[in-house]
Amino acid sequence: MSFEINYGEETQLKTDVPKRPVRPAIMKGLKGRCPNCGEGRMFGKWLKVEPACSNCGEELHHEQAQDFPPYIVISIVGHIVVTLLMIVEANWDLSMVTHLLMWIPLASVLTFALMQPVKGGVVGLQWAVRMFGFGGEEEA
């Protein structure tokens, strides 16, 4: 694997950087575990990433997931809820209140259930592809 690091007008090509497996890192992140060792906890609080892995010491404070996990969760929950809504609407004649009592709690529960695993997967992806300081370079 090689990538370029720009320092003003100078460009340095790094070729001695070992590859990190992307899929296993994402899967470990989805489980809330360190993308490096798979043992240490990634989250200290619900969505607060630990500064470093308690097991292997891998620094995790570089993560910059920001708005990407909510975007993914909205897409997933939207597809599930809209599909179910269309199926229910095609087969039964329910009142608007019944629809509200069904879909709002379902969307809320799915959103809260998916947010942490998706953020963990995004952090695992960032670690695997060496984004935002996960590659060992100094942060600007």
Image: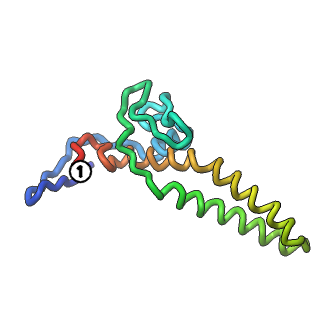
Residue wearing tag 1: 2
In this picture, is 4 found above or below 32? below
Viewer can see residue 124? yes
Tell me which amino acid carries mark 1: Ser
Identify the residue at image location x=47%, y=46%.
23
User: In the orientation shown, which residue stands out farthest toward the left?
Assistant: 9
Q: How is the image coloured?
A: rainbow
**Side (left or right) of 106 relative to 78:** right
User: In the orientation shown, which residue stands out farthest toward the right?
Assistant: 93
The mark tally for this picture is: 1
Indicate the quadrant where residue 94 lies.
Answer: bottom right
On the image, the x and y values in percent for residue 37 come to: 44, 31
In this picture, is 90 found above or below 11? below
Viewer can see residue 33? no
Identify the residue at image location x=39%, y=26%.
56
Element marked by disc 1: loop
